[in-house]
Image (cartoon, rainbow, N blue to C red):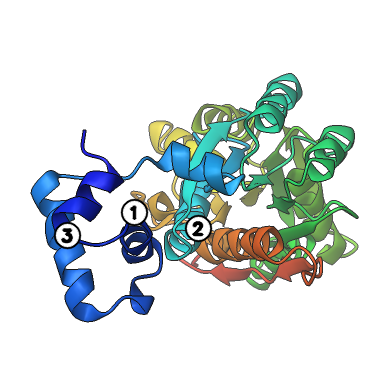
Amino acid sequence: MSSIKEVAQLAGVSVGTVSNVLNRPEVVAPETRRRVQEAIAQLGYVRNGSARQLRAGRSRTIGVVALDLANPFFIDVLRGVEAAALDADVTVMVVNSNKDAAREAALLETFEEQRPLGALITPVNDSAEEARLRRLVARGIPVVLFDSSAPYAHGCSVAVDDVLGGRLAGQHLRERGHRHIAFAGGPFGVRQVRQRHEGLASVLEPGDTLTVITLPDLTVATGRTAGKEIAELSPGERPTAVFCANDLVALGVLQEMAQRGLRVPDDLAILGYDDIGFAAAAAVPLSSVRQPREQLGHTAAKLLLDEANNPGEHEHRQVIFQPDLVERASTRA
């Protein structure tokens, strides 16, 4: 492997000039910059990022603890994170807590040891491993919560108003004449599930009925379980619409309805949440409450980078985005 000294010798410049070309090319004269770049290409020089970080005393990596990488929602959020990181010449390390509080704690302990530039996390629960997050901050590692509106005095958070999302879902279904509505989601210890249910319940009126189907997880498989429970009710007891806590559950319900020969939306209207790409591509395109997924990730990363680069001037912010409802065939009369 070639060294920076060899590049400098071949180009006939100092090591400092080569360093400037690599890090601050605008301060180097065009002709000198050209010679250095040609020497780099000729020698195949690649700078040692680890050594660079050691000299600078800080990492150029941000860590992300995602709640559930099996959910396409988080993949879209990560696209926003990566866009902001790319602009800042920072790399992204993504790990998955898989909704497991013990795993989350272990991952945060690893971050504490590795000292990333900063950390983004969707906490498993509202306590958000508060003590461990405080330790990260005490070590100079800023933390931003994303897809979380939990109060967090030690940093920023970025979330979507899930109560509003639930209200939008309920209003949409009531406007289409549904008075017996089911809610499929869980566990209710997850803030997003709880608040989406709360929003739905808040718009129901006397005479409306709400059937709650509590699920252990938000997956296509548990959605099929919810669909089975709805389908096996007698026609007089069966809800005419179901609001699912995410699109994966809604897709599972849709699969079960198709398997049983029940029509969507005639026999059951289905409404999801997140508006992932699969929602529009389903056999019966799904109506869904849309979250600004990439914007959420991009904003969280920008807040983190601002705090990491400007610790003395940065002001913590709690950003709440507004969801909107996308109507498709699964609820359209």
Which of label 3 and label 2 is nearer to you? 3
Q: CA distance from mark 3 to mark 2?
A: 54 Å
CB atoms at circles 3 and 2 under 8 Å apart? no
Three-letter amino acid code at disc 1?
Ala
- Give the foreground label among 1 and 3: 3
Q: Is residue 167 left or right of residue 5?
A: right
Which residue occupies 62% across, 38% down? 65
- Asked whether 264 or 153 is in front, the reply is 153
Mark before the other along the chain sequence, 1 or 2? 2
Confirm whether residue 6 shows in the render: yes
Instruction: Please determine whether, in this image, residue 44 is positioned above or below residue 108.
Output: below
Decide if residue 84 is on the left or right side of residue 6: right
Q: Amino acid at mark 2?
A: Asp
**Residue appearing at x 40%, y 69% in the figure:** 24
Q: Secondary structure at mark 2?
A: loop
Binning the other alpha carbons within 10 Å of mark 2 as few (below 14), some (14 to 19) or many (20 upward) gives: many
Please name the residue shown 55% across and 52% down the image: 270
Q: Name the spot of residue 179 as percent of width and height, x first.
A: 74, 59
Residue 48 appears left or right of 213: left
Q: Amino acid at mark 3?
A: Ala
Q: Residue at x 75, y 53 (%)?
A: 196
On the image, the x and y values in percent for residue 297 come to 57, 58
Which mark, by number, is residue 275? 2
Tell me the residue that label 1 is attached to: 281
Task: Note whether residue 71 is visible.
Answer: no
Q: Is residue 73 above or below residue 261?
A: below
Write down the residue under mark 3: 11
In the rendered image, residue 141, in percent from the top left (x then y), is placed at 72, 45
Q: Nearer the viewer, residue 175 or 81?
A: 81
The quarter holding residue 309 reads: bottom right
